[in-house]
Amino acid sequence: MVVSKKVLHFPTVAHPNIEEVLAWFLKDQQRRLKTRTFNRYEEVVDLLRHCLNGHGYHELDNSSEVALYEKLYFQKNLEFCLIFGPEKILNSLSNFLNYFMIRKVMASEALLQAAGVVTKKLVKWLEEKEFIGKETADRGIRLAAEAARELPAAERLARLLYEYAQSHAPRYWTSELDDYFVVEQVHPGILILSGVATTGIVEVRVPKEITDHCRKGWQVNLLLGKTRNGWCILETGNVYPN
């Protein structure tokens, strides 16, 4: 009786790797774009590369890929984008748009919008070159298109909250809540928030201009102070679309 043995193939360095594919993408875009627009594409792709090299390993699918990454990174000093292929880009796209661009980059509204636009074009290009399938591409395109709309709006809200807190912080308060708050309801001039770490619902009165820019489900980093007139904003941080 012959017993067949199942052969487990250990992953190897991809050809082409992410670095090569991103360079190819930019070369293709340079042919059709004006210099100013192409410079923005280069900026976004460079940020994506930094995100993948710094955080992409968190999204690896299995232990053998993790082992390959650790071996080549620590022994040969190879970065993530030099090890893995372009199919790994989509795994980190949400992290890039919804975490890295907000928390790690001091990005303007224009750059945040560009991040969505450029990654959407990249995903379409990856599908055209048959690096990813249609279903994966459709998911990435939806994510990037949503980011192009919501990231600039979230940055605008963060700026409005900061400006308001700077000019309207109370002089006295009795207690504080420092948390990431989820926007549960939005009414003209009133935000209903629930803390991620704290319990219960808090109501915060703000100018209508702020509530006009806020969306249910968004997460806002705030330090609140309890006054005789209710909860007031003392300090503000980032705003994260849902």
Image (cartoon, rainbow, N blue to C red):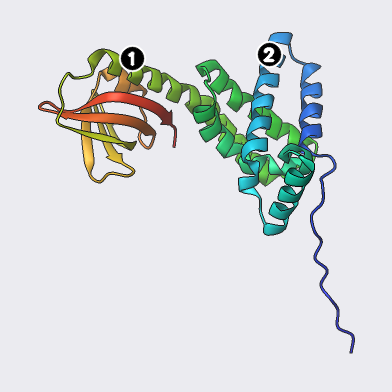
Task: Indicate the secondary structure of the residue bearing disc 2.
Answer: helix
Of labels 1 and 2, earlier in sequence is 2
Q: Are dots 1 and 2 in contact, CB under 8 Å?
A: no
* Amino acid tagged 2: Thr
From the top left corner, tell me how far across and down residue 142 is, in percent.
Answer: 58, 36
**Label 1 Cα crowd, 10 Å radius (few <14 / some 14-19 / many 20+):** few
From the top left corner, tell me how far across and down residue 227 is, in percent.
Answer: 14, 27
Q: Nearer the viewer, residue 152 or 137?
A: 152
Identify the residue under disc 2: 37
Q: Nearer the viewer, residue 55 or 125?
A: 55
Answer yes or no: is residue 84 visible. no
Gap between marks 1 and 2, in whole Å? 31 Å
Q: Quadrant of the C terminus?
A: top left
Q: Is residue 84 left or right of residue 99?
A: right
* Residue 163: mark in rendering: 1
Q: Quadrant of the N terminus?
A: bottom right
Q: Nearer the viewer, residue 125 or 181?
A: 181
Outermost residue, bottom direction? 1
* Residue 65: mark in rendering: none
Q: Residue at x 33, y 20 (%)?
A: 161
